[in-house]
Image (cartoon, rainbow, N blue to C red):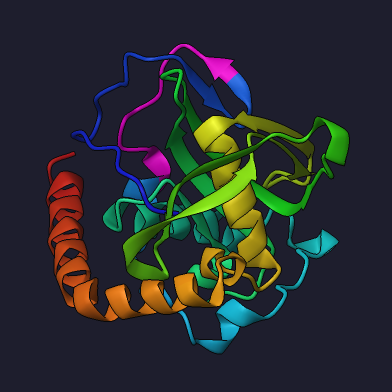
Amino acid sequence: MTGQLRASAGTEVRVRVRVQGEPVAAYPEVPPETLRGEVRRITVVGEEVLHRRCRAVREEEFGTPELARLVDDMFAAMWVAEGVGLAANQIGVDLQAFVWDCLDEEGVRHVGHILNPVLDETPAGTRRLVGADEGCLSVPGPHLELDRPDVAVVRGRDLEGRPLVVEGRGYFARCLQHETDHLYGSLYIDRLTHRGRRTALRRMEDRKEKVFAKRAARAEELARLRAGR
């Protein structure tokens, strides 16, 4: 999911922060995961890995260095693309995992990862839909309005396999829903009308080269941050 959160390595954000759903005093504005990770290419709408359900993380995979490296790589790719959320299939990996670094409307920064996530069903009588512009790193360029529930609860596990529950409201709720959709093979444009989808794809073609150039510049910026540590 698209968004922006910028700073220099080693600095801390002076806002309220929740990491893995829990409050912390502060967190580096460029996460350590980002600085450790390898920047991988982000997949684009039409690539097969984006349009099928991802496989679950198996028990024997929890706690492995390979899984930890994947999360780091997802953070690095998300930072370079100026995103607020990114799913594993967006870097070509068929696995139920996503990461986030997202500010909500109340100024709370949410940072974390989740594996094998399941989104709680919101009872129809209590669900409140809110329309807002939404974009996707795998549909580079356009943002179109989409209605989503304003509260989301996701249940899954962390890197070590421990149970994890994350709740979001407003923009962060949108992020959690958007990324969970990815793991079921669905993009936000699949929720639009046929006309809206065509509009998004047309705008993507017009804007994607500029977006890709900006990502390349951000990758160079990240390399300088790493060199300056």
Q: Is residue 42 left or right of residue 219?
A: right
Q: Is residue 216 in view?
A: yes
Query: Magenta includes 29?
Result: yes
User: Which quadrant is the N terminus positioned in?
Assistant: bottom left
User: Residue 49: x, y in percent?
Assistant: 58, 82
Left or right, 12 with respect to 57, comes to: left
Principal secondary structure, stretch drawn in magenta = loop
Nearest the viewer among 24 and 143 is 143
Can residue 216 be found in the magenta stretch? no
Residue 32 screen position, x and y as percent? 38, 39
| Image x and y of residue 152, in percent | 70, 37
Image: 143 above or below 30: below
Instruction: Give how far across and how far down residue 162 sits, in percent.
Output: 79, 39
Looking at the rendered image, the quarter that the C terminus falls into is: top left
Total numbered labels placed on residues in the image? 0
Identify the residue at horizontal 31%, vertical 31% (top origin): 29
Compared with 1, 171 (above or below) is above
What residue sits 46% from the left and 70% below the top? 196
User: What's drawn in magenta, residue-wise?
Assistant: 23-33
Q: Quadrant of residue 105?
A: top left
Q: Is residue 37 visible?
A: no
Q: Is residue 46 above or below residue 5?
A: below
Q: Residue at x 41, y 58 (%)?
A: 144
Q: Is 66 on the left or on the right of 15, as rendered?
A: right
Q: Answer with left or right where residue 39 lies relative to residue 49.
A: left
